[in-house]
Amino acid sequence: MPNKTSIANAGAQPRAALDPLRRRLLGGAAAAAVLWRGSAALAQGARVAEPFTRRLPLPALLSGKPQVDGSLGYALRMGAGSSELVAGLRTPTWGYNGSVLGPALRIPRGRVVSIDLRNALNQAATTHWHGAHVPGDQDGGPQSFLDPGQTQHYRFSLDQPGATLWYHPHTDCLTGPQVWAGLAGLLLVDDGVDRQLGLPHRWGVDDLPLVLQDRRIGADGRLQYMTGEIDRMGMKGDRFLVNGCEQPYVDVPAQWIRLRLLNGSNARVYNIALADSRPFHVIASDAGLLPRPVPLHSLLMVPAERYEILLDCRGLQGKTLTLRSDSGDIVPELSMLPQLADRFDRGSFDLLQLRVGAPTATSGRLPPRLVDIAALYSATPARKFSMQGMASDPRPSPMAAQCSQAPGPGGMSMGLHGMDMFSINHAFMDIWVINQTVKLGATEIWQIRNDAQMMHPFHVHSTSFRIVDRGGLPLPEQERGWKDVVMVRPGETVRVIARFDQPAGKNHPFMYHCHILEHEDNGMMGQFTVS
Ligand code: C2O
Ligand code: CU
Ligand code: CU
């Protein structure tokens, strides 16, 4: 029997209680015991239904309502509801403008937008525009928290290439559980270049958004968060959802199909592939189109990464394709701790079935070239970051006491409520400390070294970067475009280059952090101003 209650209440435990835990987690000899506890928890979960029986939900596309002041208006409301994440079971969830996830906000490049964000939850929360180039006070970071019942007004314009960005809570100590509860949505920057290039762009027809997430769900339908000790290293589930629906199917026409993939998971890594190993073409990374399509058979995606791929369904009418993760080839090697790879990481699992039907009258194409990306140069020495794994004596962070103790949907545990466990430059996130100061307009190289034993996806707010190198090795082609998240393997040093054009003062600084949400919530984040 896994000891659920002691883990769920671990936030209140004195730090001494965590020392034996750390020894058990990190000690190789105890790996089997930890694994056994994990699988016992799985056995109590919701029954597994036949795959591919339900249709892929399509997020609503909001294009904004023209306002008297000339801006485009959008409204988002964070609230509670109930969803059928897995067939035949009601799950209490949170969502934006609905019971789970949220609408896709389509924002034309350069247009002023105004977004009314309302908090109808039982606890404070924020919403961050991940990947958006906006000033610090519009970024929705931990300082911008909204109490229950409050509405916050955002106003900005995005001068950046067309891209698939996203939004999600960024509440101090609570980002992981609030996202796990269902809060996340897509934000599409639209500059028209995809249409000019002839890329597929009809929403829900040949342009499909796919939010990939894993969840753990009890037999009673409730979401389970942090129910095992291993979950402290990053919360993973055994049920695989696309757009909030377990293993759905989608009808697609027999032509070029564009899939906008978001790894919206807290900690899960996917190695995206088609079950018959057919190739596909990567056309965009996190923050924009690539110079040219990159043909691949599999595509690694760490948390918060986005990739857009084009799939050639011409002549396939009547066939079905299965999108899945072939994790076993690559995911276990991302960590030096074998106990961190679960049975899904060691194998493969299905995500979505595509049923190919008749082509439509007009179809998109795969152009041989996409966009030119101007190079960035920096003359200043690199700013250096290092990432450390689990601390030897984790204790509650200074913010822990102020963090809401209200439960999640259906009484879901909200995890550890902020422990100082993972660090950057040997410092734990402290909302009162500015860790870096950057000059407005500067182009900088950030050098990120991973001193820990597991992979950490590093994310920077306010800008997009390009990867300069990865331990001096040549970069895979799909990593050569605009990005805002970069995977850093254990022992690896990655350099990225970015221009910092958005201002942020000390009241609303920007964040840099690991995007494994349980790491971010438990220390692995820092703050920077730009002025
Ligand atoms: Cu996806 Cu700091 O965020
Ligand atoms: Cu972000
Ligand atoms: Cu991490």
Image: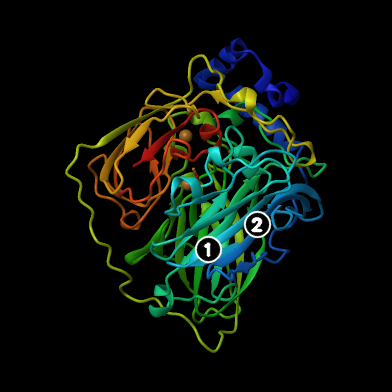
Q: Which mark is residue 76?
A: 2
Q: Which mark is residue 113?
A: 1
Closest to the observer, 354 or 183: 183
Relative to 221, residue 316 above or below = below
The structure residue drawn at horizontal position 39% and vertical position 61%, both measured from the top left corner, is: 160
Number of the front mark, 2 or 1: 1
Q: Quadrant of residue 471?
A: top left
Q: Earlier in the sequence, mark 2 or mark 1?
A: 2
Give the percent coordinates (x, y) of residue 31.
Answer: 55, 24
> Is residue 263 at least partly visible in the picture?
yes
Mark 1 sits near ligand 2, with its Cβ under 8 Å away: no
Q: Residue furthest front?
A: 69
Please tell me how crowded label 2 is: few (under 14), some (14-19), or many (20+) other residues with Cα within 10 Å: many
The structure residue drawn at horizontal position 38% and vertical position 32%, both measured from the top left corner, is: 490
Where disc 1 sits, the SS reads strand
Q: Quadrant of residue 419?
A: top right
**Would residue 435 be found to the left or right of residue 520 on screen?**
left
Name which residue type carries label 2: Leu
Give the percent coordinates (x, y) of residue 167.
Answer: 55, 52
Relative to 6, residue 367 above or below = below
**Color style of the picture:** rainbow
The quadrant the C terminus occupies is top left
Name which residue type carries label 1: Val
**Would residue 341 be found to the left or right of residue 75 on screen?**
left
Give the percent coordinates (x, y) of residue 454.
Answer: 44, 32
